[in-house]
Image (cartoon, rainbow, N blue to C red):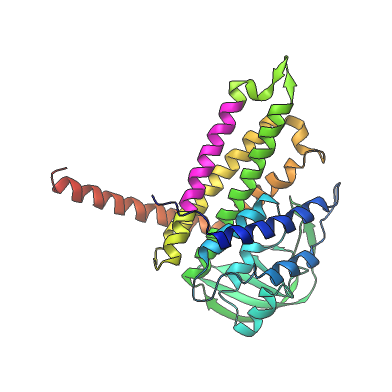
Amino acid sequence: MRDPGPTDEQAAMAEVVARLGAEIRAGAPAGPGPFPFPSAAWRRLGELGVLGIASTEGGGAGDVLAVNDALGAASFPGPISATLFALQILDPDAAHPVSAGDELVSVCTGRWYPWGNDANWLLVLDGAEVGVGRRLSPGPATTSLTRATWAQPVIEPVTRRTVPPVARVLRDLAVAGYLSGAARACLADTAAHARQRRQFGRSLGEFQAVSHALARCDAAMASAAGLARQSAWEWDHGSDAAERPALARRACTSAALDAVLACHQVFGAMGFSEETGLWRTSTAVRELSLSWPDADADALRAARAEGRRLAAEGARWRSAGY
């Protein structure tokens, strides 16, 4: 498998986004209660071109992956993957203020809209189609795992559209990138903690049960991230194989969930304290892993298609005498 890695431009953009994400994370309010939507930071993402980084012609998959990796490492709040998804569906006049960060979009896959009372555009997934509407007024609200406000606003329906393959591809790569960055940040923080924390006269990292678990998760996450980079590169270079990004998203989801579980086992109860902040990243991983239930069906179809392709390839080699 070819792992192209990020380009110099993608690395530079990711570095700028990482600095912005670190500022938001440092200024996050402590304690329980809802986290207000970071409108100013969201507009800065728009000014940087992050929200509109993928063209409507389907380019920019590698860019999407790179910047979402940086956003995930900072646990940046907001509907990143939903915005990239929606920009492939909205009319150009509606898409422009969304990509600029002046308007917000929320995609619902159940009953509640993430940041629904803050959003201007609200999309409802229904199989291969999506309903598009405008928010008329706020509705009942609740607080999610990440302290984001989810709501059921009053909506004025506008139109229905068929979901284009590029919308799902960019959605899947955005999720894969965010989860990869978040898991990498968790593992780095946990490794530092394991080096400093001492038990029974030595550091936690000297215990094989700790070091081996973190190393296994790091290797699994690196493998999944490599698959995501490969699928993004293929899409940007003309491939129409939308199933590869779906598989990459599922691989990154599985690896990230395993990683944050291992990190919490090392930190123990400290992982849920404001002192470490691990819970911010782990809850973001958990919430995002559940945010697109339709994507699991896409990944299952993709896995079956890939299995059939590999079986046919094996039969071809056997018939050639290998």
Tell me if 269 is positioned left or right of 1 in this view.
right
- Front residue of 196 and 179: 196
Q: Is residue 154 above or below residue 69?
A: below
Residue 222 inside the magenta-drawn segment: yes
Residue 49 inside the magenta-drawn segment: no
Tell me if 303 is positioned left or right of 56 in this view.
left
- Front residue of 276 and 121: 276
- Specify the farthest residue to the top: 200
Residue 152 seen in render: no
Q: Is residue 169 above or below residue 267?
A: below
Segment colored magenta: 211-228
For the point 52% across and 49% down, the residue is 225
- Front residue of 202 and 167: 202
**Residue 312 point in image, percent of width and height:** 24, 52
For the point 58% across and 39% down, the residue is 258
**Residue 85 point in image, percent of width and height:** 58, 68
For the point 55% across and 59% down, the residue is 8
**Residue 290 point in image, percent of width and height:** 61, 52
Most common SS among magenta residues: helix
The image quadrant that residue 264 belongs to is top right
Q: Which part of the image, by quadrant, shows the C terminus?
A: top left
